Amino acid sequence: MEIIKTKDPTVFEQYAEECLAGHEGIIICINENPCVWTGQLPTIDKSVCEEKDLVIGTGRYLGGTIVNMKGDVSICHTSWGITDFAPDIVDKFADYLTERGIEVTRDENDVLAEGKKVLSWARATTIEGWTQSVIHFSVGKVNLKLI
């Protein structure tokens, strides 16, 4: 399995799609600039994103949109068949925070630390049987106006 690291969300999206075409892989993106990730459902105003010069990446999962800040980390894991890659990472991360005395709550596919979202994840399986799992860690400085 190939593992790729990038700062470019366009490379992240291209490699994620390439993997879905027939090979397992992991890509890690540590954002150099803010960008937006969204699913297949229309959950964002693309004209506003273009106005703010935000790259828009689209995953194979259905819904949900997240604004990635500079320094945020996104991971995409592509494998054949159903996988618990994302839920396992989410569980381990939540346990890690809890063990350090940080109050952790969960809201569906989000993890909140002391009331602030620090992680979100999604998963989709193609008709051909490939599974794409994505995890986003909010670690950059948040710009609420941008969101």
Image (cartoon, rainbow, N blue to C red):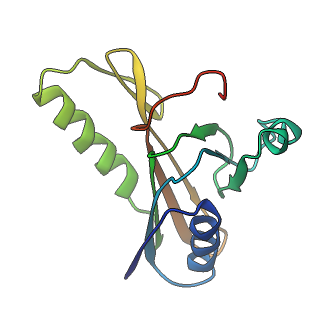
Q: Is residue 1 above or below residue 123?
A: below
- With 32 as the anchor, is 75 left or right in this view? left
The quadrant where residue 126 appears: bottom right
Q: Position of residue 118 (x, y in %)?
A: 40, 32
Q: Position of residue 89 (x, y in %)?
A: 30, 49
Quadrant of the rendering where the N terminus is positioned:
bottom left
Q: Position of residue 11 (x, y in %)?
A: 60, 70
Q: Residue at x 63, y 65 (%)?
A: 13
Q: Residue at x 31, y 16 (%)?
A: 114
Q: Is residue 81 visible?
A: no
The quadrant where residue 93 appears: top left
Q: Is residue 91 visible?
A: yes
Q: Nearer the viewer, residue 14 or 144?
A: 144
Q: Residue at x 39, y 38 (%)?
A: 139
Q: Is residue 71 above or below residue 144?
A: below
Q: Nearer the viewer, residue 26 or 123?
A: 26
- With 36 as the anchor, is 100 left or right in this view? left
- With 114 as the anchor, is 35 left or right in this view? right
Q: Residue at x 57, y 63 (%)?
A: 8
